[in-house]
Image (cartoon, grey):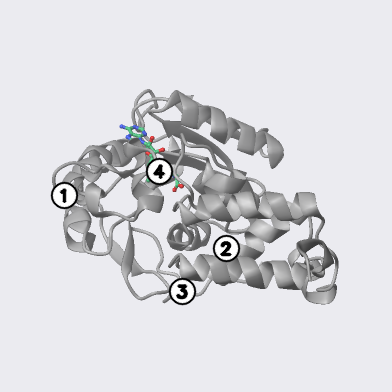
Amino acid sequence: MTASDSPAPTLLTAWKAAQAVLKTGRIDSPSIDARLLLEAATGATRMDILSDPYRVVTPEQQAQLDAYVERRLRREPVSRILGRKGFWKIMLNVTPDVLSPRPDTETLIDVAVLAHAKNEAFTVADLGTGSGAILLAILAERPAATGVGTDISFEAIAVARDNAAELELDNRATFLRTEWATGFADHSFDLVVSNPPYIPTDDIAGLDPEVREHDPILALDGGPDGLQAYRDLAPEIARVLKPDGVFAVEIGWDQGPQVKALFEAQGFADVKIVKDLGDRDRVVTNGLDPRVNPIPKD
Ligand SMILES: C[S@@+](CC[C@H](N)C(=O)[O-])C[C@H]1O[C@@H](n2cnc3c(N)ncnc32)[C@H](O)[C@@H]1O
């Protein structure tokens, strides 16, 4: 049998073949990654793959899938290959200038949405906004809220603005290139959130290539002990937050006690460490813990 006699690939066989290649290349989640790449290469949805598995994959689509798989084997993350990433309930454009938003950061959204009821009007600041992920997820959940995202990177601000426009949230979100909260008046915000860089400088070389080679260093490097951004942020957050306001910052799994102490030193009461779904310390806040106060279905 010649190659031209072999049966044309289908959504199912192409998915399985891509999965096998990624598995051989020791890629962490071969099944999910192969499916996402197949969807992008063919235009099929996840439902199409399940309900119409014998749909033929054209040679052009197969070539596109092969090219994507090749890039993934070189440890480029799927979000970089496709230029987009799902986060919370929104889809975001991502470029090499922004951190690819992480599922871990959804714990911060769980905490943030507990601070205000669904239709309450309030103001929020997201310091170090990157793609705009955190601010835009909160605004998508809270239709009367307005917010500002800041970043030191001009390029990140441009990506965040594009994302706000695509999600039709640009009437409630503004973005500003500044150092953390510099330029904002005292007591400006009801809610302040941040996922700052928190990897100790010397640990960066040991990260997976997906992170080390594809996330911007500005989004990773937390200084010698990983805590520098929190030292800068704690007094700034204390300054711009309203007296009864809520703050929430993401942390590395082993940074809880130190970051909690930095915020307590600024006079915040009832500071707590919130765990993520993997039971690891993930957020420091003076707000509510979603594991103790379940999120209302609204
Ligand atoms: C870990 S990334 C988080 C991005 C986004 N908030 C997210 O969760 O996906 C940290 C962000 O902080 C920004 N950043 C770093 N230093 C900063 C500073 N001094 N002032 C403002 N933003 C800063 C980086 O450019 C980067 O976009």
At which x and y percent is residue 133?
A: 53, 46
Check disc 3 and report the residue beneath it. Answer: 293
- Quarter occupied by residue 219: top left
Q: Amino acid at mark 3?
A: Asn
- CA–CA distance in space, label 3 to label 4: 34 Å
Q: Earlier in the sequence, mark 3 or mark 2?
A: 2
Check disc 2 and report the residue beneath it. Answer: 33
Q: Earlier in the sequence, mark 1 or mark 4?
A: 4
**Front disc: 4 or 2:** 2
- Left or right: where 65 falls relative to 273: right
Q: Amino acid at mark 4?
A: Asp
Disc 1 on helix, strand or loop? loop
Check disc 1 and report the residue beneath it. Answer: 265
Query: Residue 215 — which label?
Result: 4
Q: For the residues labelled 1 and 3, say whether their Cβ atoms are less than 8 Å apart.
A: no
At which x and y percent is residue 79?
A: 55, 50
